[in-house]
Amino acid sequence: MDIYSTYYMLAAVKELPPEHTFFKRRYFPTNETMDVFGTTKVLADYKEGSQRRAPFVLPRIGSVSVAREGFSTYELEPGNISISMPLTADQLKARGFGESLMSNLTPSDRARMLLIGDLQELSARISRTEEWLAVQTMLNNGCTMRHQTEVKDVYEDIPVKFYDGEDNPALFTPAAKWEHGTADKPGNWYADVCAMIKMLTSRGLPARELLVSTDVGEFLMEDPWILKMLDNRRVELGHIAPAELTDYVSELGVFNFKGRSLSILVSDGTFEDENGADTPYIPGGSVIVTAPICGKGLYGGVTQLENDGNIYTYAGTRVPQHIFTVRPPVKETQLTAKPLFVPARKSPWTTAKNVFD
């Protein structure tokens, strides 16, 4: 069996253990049947939120005809993430990481081990980009995908936005920087969060979670009004019950905002950007009000030139390929994904940025 055939590696990718992601899994889940396309572009459907009520009608009139809620369909081209890892002849002969000093592995055995390890590492890197993409989509009601060009350190930005016009309807701008109040009166942050919630609920959209950056989470935990309210141990006001949801997201507890109970989630997750800098997924001073499954993760088809000289397009969240060069003799394991995270309805989140500025 050729372990480097695309079909073998596709099967191997499906058997990889799932990545421990949070933002993608919680807010943009992917239905493998409906959301993974065999074409380079994807179709995204979503509706406007509506709170229209039914009218009262006299019995002799019968009923009043109402129109079905309309929806919008957009044809979009996902970003292209493609990374590879080389494999040289020397690596097939040398002892690998974690391998016994007295190992009897043959080069063929070692090739299989290295292939699975490389696919895992490449997939993990793609998952970090997907986590970043999920947060950016909520923060900006769209995203700008920066693509590497043929020239080193030269990039091409491809923007996607999920609203019409210039003004982002999901962006809330605080009138003043957030400050603490007193034990008897909350600071201006409380009214801002309530207004952000109202921007969703007035359109019939749920508001169940307050997702914040590390500095905002620390600010809330130090607020004297919150501490006093929670110290009263009154259930209707909320409670602090810290819980780790993943390695980089924790739930501080549930708090009541004028009758709306929201879980407060704090992220301290970081990734290494293209310049090697440690960068938080959620930038400082950021606040997002939303609910789980507010969108979905779509994937476009990946087109590849295979070793038989033919061009094929594969549908999948991860599409592998084996590339071989003679001079120098190097094999490369390449993994490609074409993700795009879209809202399930128009603007199912509200965001505020730089709340301390």
Image: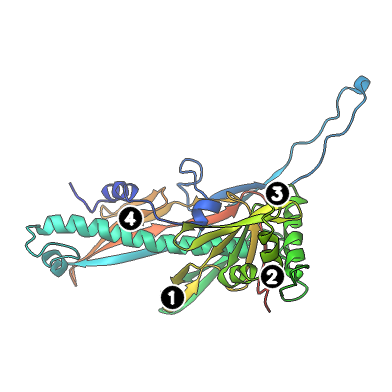
Kindly check if marks 2 and 1 are in contact, taking CB atoms under 8 A apart as contact.
no
Q: Nearer the viewer, mark 3 or mark 1?
A: 3
Label placed on residue 320 = 4
Sequence-wise, the earlier of marks 3 and 1 is: 3
Residue position marked by numbered label 1 in the rendering: 274
Are the residues at dot 1 and dot 4 in contact (C-beta closer than 8 Å)? no
* Badge nearest the viewer, 2 or 1: 2
Residue at point 56% right, 53% down?
A: 27
* Observer-nearest of 13 and 313: 13
- Taking 353 as reference, is 301 left or right? left
Which of the two discs, 1 and 4, labels the residue nearer the N terminus? 1
Q: CA distance from mark 1 to mark 4?
A: 22 Å
* Callout 1 amino acid: Glu
Q: Position of residue 180 (x, y in %)?
A: 71, 73
User: Which colouring convention does the figure follow?
Assistant: rainbow
Which residue bears the numbered disc 3?
Answer: 205
Depth check, mark 1 against mark 4: the one in front is 1
